[in-house]
Image (cartoon, coloured by chain):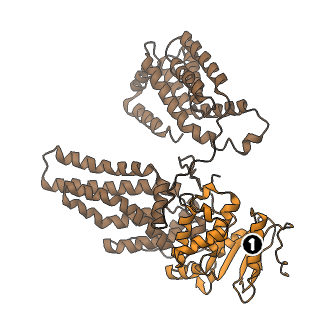
Chain colours: A brown, B orange
Amino acid sequence: MRLLLPLITVAFGAGMLLGTDFLTSIARVLFGERASGGSAVLTGALFLGTAAEAAPRVCRGLGGWMRHLPVSGLAHRRAAGLAIAIAQAPLLLGFLVLACYASPAPAALVANALKLAITACAAALYATPVERRWRSLPLALTATVLAGAGGWGALGAAALLLVAADLLAGPLVRSGPPAVHLSRRSRGSLVELRIAWRALGRGLFGALAAGLLPVAAAFAFTHNNALAPEHIRLAARLGATLSAVAVLAQMAEALAVRRPAWPWSRSLPWSSARRVGADALILGAHALPLVLLAAWIHPTALVALAILPFLAVRAAGAMRRGSRAADRRRRRDRDGGRSPRGPGRPASPGPPCSPSRRVPWAVKAAAERERRQKVSRWLELHHLAAGDPQSWSAS
Amino acid sequence: MGLGPGLTLLLGPNGCGKSTLLKLAAGIERPDAGRIEIDGHDLWSDARSEVAARRGLAYVPEQPDLTPYATLREILDLVCRLRGEPRERGSEELARVGLGDLSHRSVRELSMGQRRRAVLAAALVGTPSQALLDEPLEAMDRAAREDLLAWTDRWSPPAPPWSWSPTKSSPSSRAPPAPSR
């Protein structure tokens, strides 16, 4: 559902803005009498994408304790495949609604429903990590596209291919613990930075790319338009600030998921403020080059450096997530309300206006969040599902 | 509640809060009410006191939750740096618990017993005044158990207090007799 949220939002928004004509047009393109092979490829691609996203989450841990239960390997794999197919249900329902728009006739509806069901099942089989992948994969992929490409003949052929792929696939592939790639020669210098880099992995490039976009947009805006000097300055400042915010937000989110609070390390002789400060330094150091890059558009972009420490500390504080109930209680206390546990404390002052006074305030607030963090509590962050190959909880 | 010098055993059925008490004492979790002092320093009051309290603390958790993104050597280097000890101490302690040859590995490449030894090596770095051992013999082989028990036997009053939470006893775990209640 999380993956499909943007798609559903766009479809819903477009439907609301453009009216039923839009939905009817899309429905006819995909399911009308003149629907071409291109429509089948588009439908198949959407199903494949959803299945590929769902498969790692569904299949995680299936090779462990569950495997010892009295079920054959084939049945085990089929159950996993079915679960992946079910994960595509929202997409399937969306397409069925469109199919109704295209042709409300029962026969056409049945045919479209069968096409979609076979496409979803074939996509699920394609995404399932099976032992004999290279035998089943081409058949499942062909079935995914063929199911929606033509009439009953193509549908029948797709069903046959799906059955053949299922028979050839074999059980789920056996997966060992994720590989560990650490430098064997590294010493203890900059351990915190090394841990952060390793946890982020390729996600670091994604964060930097996200930060590069505002700078690139500011550059394109100032380069391709005849602007007054104050507008160029404004664009450079805006690009630098947005770039810093984008990098900090992306990195902080990724680190909160992939490198959560390390409970044991809290027993070591370092303070909460020190841990927050180390994270803020790591975050800020990665945002700094982009601000400097924005200064190439106009030196006034360096103004963003004044707020960068504050933003970095706030991002480091935001990584320390508490439970929603605790956050609500803290907000109530801060606002002077009464908490359910007792009388509320007086309202604490907000951030000071002066940039120089904001950083200590932010460090104090972030350190308090770090202290209040319930590190032993299970957090719904799903490290492995988020693509973390070295989840702390995985054995 | 106060823990004096010497060995203190925490005994109780599953789920009664032994590990939670040790987590609170080790500064892993902050108590909702009350305060915890180690050698007179509050664990959660301010940065200076936090560091001072944790400086004399060694904690061996039940679940050795070492980061998988660092090698054992790097983790021990971090511990040495924070405790103000030379790096060589980390290597020495790793060798002492039998992990000298595995110092380049991530915790993900170790068995549970080896992970627990690694945390024990970290606890041995420096001169902790308080050591909190949560199920210290769990997942250890016989030789490691004997070493650990011999090591803890050396601590007698007025040496540092040792808190220990064994849930169950086995023929090989010859823990000291339970304190009278």
Is residue B175 toward the left or the right of residue A134 in the image?
right
Residue A36 image-quadrant placement = top left
Dividing the picture into quarters, in which one does residue A93 lie?
Answer: top right
Quadrant for the C terminus of chain B, please.
Answer: bottom right
User: Foreground residue, B27 or A29?
Assistant: B27
Q: Is residue A183 above or below residue B119?
A: above
In the rendered image, is residue A74 in sight? yes
In x, y percent, where is residue B52?
55, 82
- Specify the farthest residue to the bottom: B158
Callout 1: 10 Å neighbours few (<14), some, many (20+)? Answer: few
Horizontally, residue B128 falls left or right of residue B137, namely: left
- Label 1 sits on a secondary structure element that is helix
Q: Quadrant of the N terminus of chain B?
A: bottom right
Q: Residue A13 location in percent, x, y?
A: 41, 36
The image shows residue A329 at horizontal and vertical percentages of 56, 66
Name above or below for residue A161 compared with residue A288. above
Residue beneath disc 1: B147
Q: Nearer the viewer, residue B105 or A391?
A: B105
The numbered mark 1 sits on a residue in which chain?
A: B
Picture coordinates of residue B47, whole percent (x, y): 50, 79
Q: Amino acid at mark 1?
A: Asp
Residue A354 seen in the figure: no
Image position of A322 with respect to B32: above or below: above
Q: Residue at x 75, y 85 (%)?
A: B156
Q: Is residue B166 above or below residue A146?
A: below
Residue appearing at x 64%, y 66% in the figure: B118
